[in-house]
Image (cartoon, helix red, strand yellow):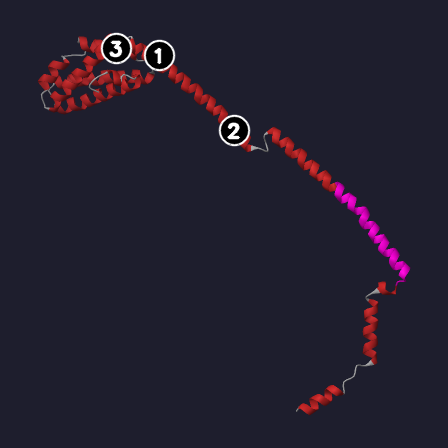
Amino acid sequence: MATPFLSTANTFHPSPLSSSASSSSSLSTSPSLFLPPTQNAKRKLAICKAVNESAPLSLNLTKRSFSICFITSFGLLFSGKGCPSANAAILEAEDDEELLEKVKKDRKKRLERQGVISSSNKETGYLQDLVYRLSKVGQAIDNNDLSTASSVLGGSTNTDWVKNANTAFTKLSSSPEEKTEVDTFNSSLASLISSVTRNDVESSKLAFVSSASAFQKWTALTGLTAQLKGL
């Protein structure tokens, strides 16, 4: 089997025709090889000249683009559009000013309130008597001793201790919230007196909780909690 393969390989010779065609094809794809040396030199010179002339144009465009970008960024910086952190800082400063102003006002109100409380020893005494009576009534109701609760409260809201308490409320209340709690207290106190008079233990307990809660809220709003004992 090896002999025929070798004999076939030895008998193979390239034909002159195929060699000539290959050379012709190769030459036809490289026309520059047939240009005279002088023409080749001129062509290379023209190409180099074109490249050199285009280079400054690209550089000028690059400088111009850089200048436009720089000027745009510079303008945005000072207009605030390009720097959101600057806008945030301005807003934060405004918020700080508003907060500081609010703190100043609150401090001024607190000092004024302390001045009023310091000059209201008589009214503070009325309120201390109120605390004492509510404490006694609460203990009596908890023991289902409504007779004792009735003797402490009195038969109506027209008693001296209730009038004195309302005198203190009027002088020491300044905000709408404080006045609302005063109204709630007086309404609950009237229900408490009525329930105790009727000997209604459950209603008395509910009315007592409501009146005591309203009074505690009022003292917290007015800053009198620390001034009164038993709260």
Q: Quadrant of the C terminus?
A: top left
Contact, CB < 8 Å: mark 2 with mark 3? no
User: Between marks 1 and 3, how big is the CA–CA gap?
Assistant: 17 Å
SS of the residue under disc 3? helix
Based on the displayed image, in which of its 4 quarters is residue 148 positioned? top left
Q: Earlier in the sequence, mark 1 or mark 3?
A: 1
Question: Residue 125 shows which numbered tag?
Answer: none
Residue 112: image tag = 1
Query: Which amino acid lies under the numbered mark 2 shown in the image of this protein?
Result: Ala
Q: Look at the image and tell me in which quarter the N terminus lies.
A: bottom right
- State the image quarter where residue 87 is shown: top right
Which of the numbered marks, if any, corresponds to residue 168?
Answer: 3
Which one is earlier in the sequence, the residue at label 2 or at label 3? 2
Please check the rendered image and state whether residue 41 is part of the magenta-colored stretch, yes or no. yes
Alpha carbon separation for disc pair 2 and 1:
35 Å
Residue name at image x 81 percent, y 48 percent = 52
Q: Is residue 158 visible?
A: no
Side of 6 where 35 appears, left or right? right
Q: Mark 3 belongs to which amino acid?
A: Ala
Number of other residues with Cα within 10 Å of mark 1, as a class: few under 14, some 14 to 19, many 20 or more? few
The span shown in magenta is: 35-60
Is 96 in front, or is 166? 96
Residue 118 image point, x, y percent:
29, 10
Q: Which mark is residue 89?
A: 2
Given contact means CB atoms under 8 Å apart, are the residues at marks 1 and 3 in contact?
no
Q: Is residue 34 above or below residue 151?
A: below
Indicate the quadrant where residue 78 lies: top right
Q: Residue at x 86, y 53 (%)?
A: 45
